[in-house]
Image (cartoon, rainbow, N blue to C red):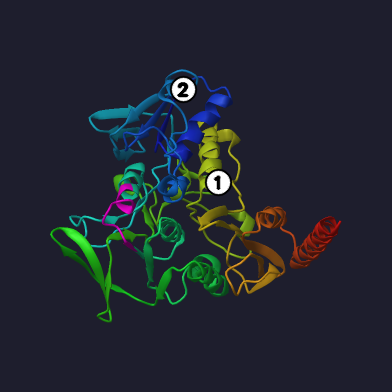
């Protein structure tokens, strides 16, 4: 093994090159990125980067670190356009890179509304350039009204930023219950309460018929029922599609991502990581058979390191299991989720979900706890993540919930006693 190529210079790609260097791999390492930017932190782009008065540098490392400490060749600003798994080559611009091991971590592209490409004031939030443009748009002198198409986590974060900046915010969601696929119907309604509590107008079960423009700039949206929603800034948050176009003809199996085995191997010498990876997570094989694809920061970081180690030493490859985890910052609070939303029962074990939080809910599938959602209760969710990872039962989860309830009550009693003295 002499040359590792990593295609995709985001978090998964960065963790890939860091992992093999940390393990002592002394062969050549090349990191390919479509963007000109060095690897940067994406989650803040729809949160702090948009809302903060001072812009923090989102880059993970300086360029000198790649050339020096990591000894990595950077090939940035030109996307990979082809993969030949038989010849073990990747085409990048006019270069043909040969590899012994390859990590594919090209992520995903934001979905857009057809016909909006040339309309000013229409934004997506996926890249640093997207965030730079949207940040300026939200602060423009004429900006008074923000409309977000899609009530997913990215759209919800942008909506929350808009309210913080003093804009009138409307969310348009095609589903009757926002986030129902991600967290279930009941919890989707609970999170919708959180928006409305902060003055965001959430309209569900609506379809965008047309984006209205004057003089080349967005002025509104016409819905399927003929209603028009006036706006100054339009953000499209209708999900992302895996960046797999460049892999056409490669021989890899493409199905809403690149399909891999339990070790993240997609072909001999080829491993996948991050938003593009679809693999069987054996931790949930008994309750959710098949494959899963995750668009989470933690999964991208874990998979990047694991995929690179397997590419360098395929003989040592092991099955990759994980308890999915993601967080989302809305308004002044945090939404956290661990595990999967599949199951036959959801139970709120702390707080009240009818007013938008704070609360914690857990998910059951058969006799197992498989998921947990917390709103503004950060100390709770990771405790349930450990139970899920250990394949603990529903009774174990209820026992933990009772213990946590007693601990919170005792702390409240101590605070009350302290306040009275």
Q: Which residue is mark 2?
A: 65
Q: Residue at x 24, y 33 (%)?
A: 93
In the rendered structure, which disc, 2 or 1, sits on the residue that comes first in sequence? 2
Label placed on residue 251: none
Toward the viewer: 12 or 118? 118
Say whether residue 73 is left or right of residue 352.
Answer: left
Residue sitting at the far front? 421
Label placed on residue 298: 1
Instruction: Please count the marks in the image.
Output: 2
On the question of residue 4 being in view, the answer is yes
Say whether residue 123 is left or right of residue 378.
Answer: left
> Which element carries disc 1, helix, strand or loop?
helix
Return the x and y of residue 224 as percentages of the image width and height: 27, 78
Q: Residue at x 51, y 35 (%)?
A: 15
Quadrant of the image for the C terminus?
A: bottom right
Say whether residue 197 is left or right of residue 390.
Answer: left
Residue sitting at the far left? 215
Return the x and y of residue 123 as percentages of the image width and height: 30, 54
- Per the rendered image, the range of residues in magenta is 136-146
């Amino acid at each position: 093994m002499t040359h590792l190529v990593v295609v995709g210079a985001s978090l998964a790609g960065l963790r890939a090159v860091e992992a093999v260097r940390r393990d002592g791999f002394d062969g050549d390492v090349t990191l390919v990125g479509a963007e000109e930017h060095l690897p940067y932190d994406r989650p803040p782009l729809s949160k702090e980067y948009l809302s903060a008065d001072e812009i923090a540098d989102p880059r993970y490392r300086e360029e000198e670190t790649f050339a020096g400490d990591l000894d990595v060749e950077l090939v940035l600003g030109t996307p990979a356009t082809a993969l030949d798994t038989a010849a073990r080559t990747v085409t990048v611009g006019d270069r043909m890179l040969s590899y012994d091991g390859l990590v594919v971590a090209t992520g995903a592209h934001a979905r857009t509304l057809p016909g909006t490409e040339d309309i000013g004031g229409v934004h997506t939030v996926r890249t640093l350039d997207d965030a730079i443009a949207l940040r300026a748009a939200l602060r423009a002198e004429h900006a008074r009204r923000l409309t977000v198409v899609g009530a997913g986590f990215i759209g919800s974060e942008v909506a929350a930023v808009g309210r913080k900046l003093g804009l009138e915010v409307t969310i348009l969601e095609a589903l009757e219950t926002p986030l129902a696929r991600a967290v279930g119907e009941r919890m989707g309604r609970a999170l919708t309460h959180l928006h409305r509590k902060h003055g965001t107008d959430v309209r569900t079960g609506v379809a965008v018929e047309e984006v209205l423009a004057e003089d080349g700039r967005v002025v509104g949206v016409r819905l399927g029922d003929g209603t028009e929603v006036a706006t100054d800034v339009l953000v499209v948050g209708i999900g992302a599609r895996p960046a797999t176009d460049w892999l056409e003809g490669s021989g890899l199996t493409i199905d809403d991502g690149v399909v891999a085995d339990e070790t993240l191997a997609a072909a001999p010498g080829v491993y996948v990581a991050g938003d593009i990876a679809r693999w069987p997570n054996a931790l949930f094989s008994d309750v959710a058979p098949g494959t899963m694809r995750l668009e989470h920061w933690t999964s991208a970081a874990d998979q990047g390191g694991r995929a690179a180690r397997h590419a360098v030493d395929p003989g040592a490859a092991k099955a990759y299991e994980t308890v999915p985890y993601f967080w989302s910052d809305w308004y002044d609070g945090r939404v956290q989720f661990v595990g999967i939303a599949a199951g036959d029962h959801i139970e709120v074990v702390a707080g009240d979900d009818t007013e938008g939080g704070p609360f914690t809910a857990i998910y059951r599938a058969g006799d197992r706890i498989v998921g947990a959602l917390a709103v503004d209760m950060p100390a709770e969710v990771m405790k349930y993540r450990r139970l899920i990872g250990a394949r603990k039962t529903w009774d174990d989860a209820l026992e933990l919930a009772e213990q946590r309830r007693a601990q919170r009550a005792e702390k409240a009693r101590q605070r009350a006693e302290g306040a009275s003295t």
